[in-house]
Amino acid sequence: MFDRPDYSADDLLQDCRYDTYVAYLILIVIVIALILGPGIWVQRVLAKYSKPEDRYEGTGASLARHLLDKHGLQSVDVETTESGDHYDPIAKVVRLTPDKHDGRSLTAITVAAHEVGHAVQDHTSYAPLKWRTRLVGAMSGIEKVGAGVLVISPFLGILTRIPALGVLALLAGMTTLASSALIHFITLPTEFDASFNRALPMLDKHRILKSADRPHARRLLTAAALTYVSASLMSLLNIARWIAILRR
């Protein structure tokens, strides 16, 4: 029989530490993949079907205008924006980034239809959209408060000489910043409704899509539905940034 080497307590402790580090590293990679993965996929899909740029005769803006008029929504405007494609239910405006507003690619056409889908939801008093509008409006102010709480949390513990108070403030601030992602997860059905119960039927009904483009349009509509969620997940990285800053 071969002699089994003896391991000291220090060796066992070192092995345990190594296994723990590996487990932490794997966990970190998984978390980063979950946060960054959806956003990377969304951007790749949008970019892929942005070529060729002249796939369709009309622009995203002209299609949006056409679909809005077909639904009796002449009062809803179509504007260009640098703040991301969205429908503003307060101002009653479909806003498209310049590449979608003036573009004639499959991406431009499909994203424009998705945002019109939200306008139709608003017109028909689609309850989940109204709930999301209220939640997002409420959270915009709360997120600013959360950022402020994160800034003052380390000083709060020092000034009051109650460390636990600073820790509680830090946790409250991080929870506030993370709530944005949670809201978009909760309201994700609203996005899929805009894509597949509104936009895709409109594109089919008015025969907008080239026949070969329909399966690709479905992928784009999925990406459009996940845009807010992927952006919210990316915002979770702000929490890690704040933790790194506060640890200095």
Image (cartoon, rainbow, N blue to C red):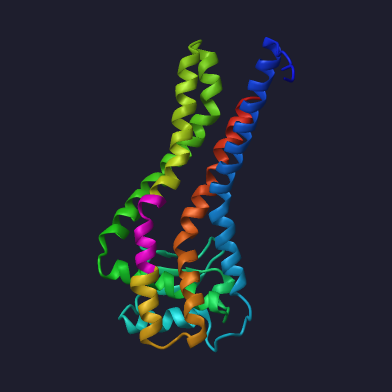
Q: In this view, does 3 lie to the left or right of 92?
A: right
Q: Is residue 111 left or right of residue 192?
A: right
**Res 118 visible:** no
Q: Where is residue 18 in the image (x, y as percent from the top left)?
A: 67, 25
Count of marks placed on residues: 0
Residue in the picture at 55% in, 42% down = 31
**Quadrant of the rendered image containing residue 51:** bottom right
Residue in the picture at 42% in, 42% down = 179
The image shows residue 227, relative to residue 208, as above or below, that is above
The image shows residue 66, relative to residue 161, as above or below, that is below
Q: Where is residue 210 in the image (x, y as percent from the top left)?
A: 49, 87
In magenta stretch: residue 37: no
The image shows residue 53, relative to residue 127, as above or below, that is below
Quadrant where the N terminus is found in the figure: top right
- Magenta span: chief secondary structure: helix
Residue in the picture at 31% in, 66% down = 122
In magenta stretch: residue 185: yes
Furthest residue in direction front, as rendered: 1
Residue in the picture at 46% in, 25% down = 169
Q: Position of residue 140 (x, y in %)?
A: 43, 46
Nearest the viewer among 1 and 66 is 1
Q: Where is residue 27 in the image (x, y as percent from the top left)?
A: 57, 37
Nearest the viewer among 115 and 51 is 51
Quadrant where the C terminus is found in the figure: top right
Q: What stretch is highlighted in magenta?
A: 184-194
Nearest the viewer among 80 and 115 is 115
**Res 135 visible:** yes
**Quadrant of the rendered image containing residue 189:** bottom left
